[in-house]
Image (cartoon, grey):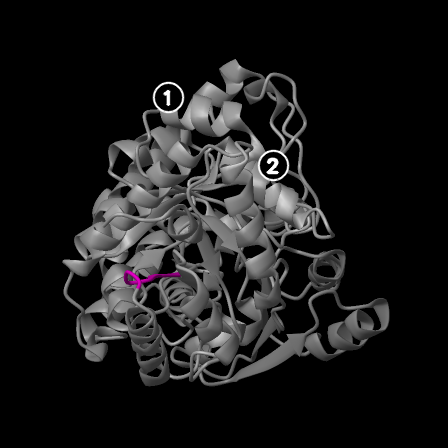
Amino acid sequence: MKLTLEQAAGQQFLLSFTDKQAVPPALRAILDRQQIGGVVLFRAKNMGSLQELRTLTADLQCAAKTSGQPPLLVAADQEGGQLMAVGDATPFPGNMALGAARSERLAWQVGRAIGREMAAVGINVDFAPVCDVNNNPKNPVVGTRSFGEDPKLAGQLAGAMIKGLQAAGVAATAKHFPGHGDTCSDSHHAAPVLPHNLRRARRIELPPFQAAIDAGARLVMTAHIVFPALNGGSTVPATVSPAILRGLLRRKLGFAGIIVTDAMDMHAMEQGAGYIADTMAALHAGVDLVLFNHDLARVEPAWATVVQAALRGLLSSDEMFASAARVLALKKWLQKQEQPPLKVVRCREHQMLAATVAQTSVTLVRDSARRLPLALNPEARIAVVVPRPQDLTPADTSSYLTPQLAAAIRRHHDKVDEFLVSMDPGEADRRHLSTQLRGYDLVIAGTINATPGQAALVKGVLKQGTPLIAIAMRMPYDLASYPAVETYLCTYSILPPSMDAVADAMWGKAAFAGRLPVTI
């Protein structure tokens, strides 16, 4: 398909919108005015029922066809674990659980299952898997989205998941290049700086991305991080760095697919009048697709400026056409894929697979008190304490869930009371709860990224002598916040399969098969 310059520029834009049931008029107007690469769907903005989602994606493709342009890329963040754009899909425990399971076979199967479910609802690009090596306990945004701290393992599992996703006809995206795992800040709020040298990057950050490229990943997503050693000392984010994208990713790592930005509305990038300049800078650096997660009213000014910049030689028209050709090639591949029926979503096969991942990943870190497996008197009273989850980062959908740990434990023991606490309970709440817990024979306390209030609560239970089992339901590093705990478990996920698996293992109905994928 031969494109005009205006059409080629349009193919480099991925847009977002807010509607769960229809293509909004503002987006239809854009489709009538210019071509676009596609859209990105988000849980809060676009996810109704599964049938509504499938209808919405079909309507989007129909609107594009009616406007005389190629089919759309329809993308979403369906990672499993803490970030699931499609909340009604099978609740796979996520990458760090796969890291604890250490199984390429399971990673491939999960990738294929996620791919089939996304294809069934009309999503053809998955912004997964995360290839970041999480070796920083203070990383606020990656965490359990990573396969762990071992670059080789991360690469093996990422490669397997990519092959599984693409076997299902959905394009996989390796993210966040060149590596967001060793940061102490979140690029949604500011641009993190990695001070490491090139030798270290080649050893830690880059191997999983090379493995992803070798596995055939069709997209790589940039990170809005500053990595001076990879950028000639410059402190501009990787998303706008020709040295990192054209030099390192294209020439040295040999990536020939599509480079897509992380969302351009993140505060590591310019959000004021300079948002158009950052869009141009990303295209100049070698980006093929700009995730333009701005208000739709900003699309035309950015697109028109990009076209004018190419006409004036500020952007290369040849490179713009080359990027558009890569996008169209992906669309051609996607057109050949068959859409599965909606019934594959949460089918029995996929739910059994999620349970297997959970069972294979649950990890016993310590049981110096020799409490496990549990063999309690039927009259023994158990208190289960869990935080009410919040989204700890914009790349998080945990707030949609309430952990079903108490319900899972009730399958093994009748006398179970549940206590829900805030994510960071204050002193008065902790004191009141500690008083209530004194009458129990066993306290099972779940923590989620062990905030100071959660850690103090666990320590308070220890101090009063009540038998305690602590479960890190997200990051394994929680133990460092309450190191005196004698029985400590990790699930890597608050989703139901992981809650069922840890309960089964505590009662000896299944083995603790997982191995820590990070160092505590």
Image: 57 above or below 321: below
User: What residue lies at 56% left-to-right and 80% top-to-bottom?
Assistant: 381
Q: Is residue 177 above or below residue 140?
A: above
Lower sequence index among marks 2 and 1: 2
Q: Disc number at residue 485?
A: none
Q: Amino acid at mark 2?
A: Ile
In the rendered image, residue 74 lying in the magenta stretch gets the answer yes
Q: Is residue 385 visible?
A: yes
Residue at left offset 63%, top offset 73%:
388
| Pointer 1 residue | 251
Q: Where does residue 72 sit, x and y in percent of width and height?
A: 33, 62
Q: Which picture quadrant has residue 137?
A: top right
The region drawn magenta spans: 69-75
Q: Which residue is mark 2?
A: 225
The answer to whether residue 482 shows anywhere in this view is: no
Residue 189's spot in the image, x, y percent? 70, 50
Residue flagged by tag 1: what amino acid is it?
Arg
Give me the C-alpha separation between circle 2 and circle 1.
20 Å
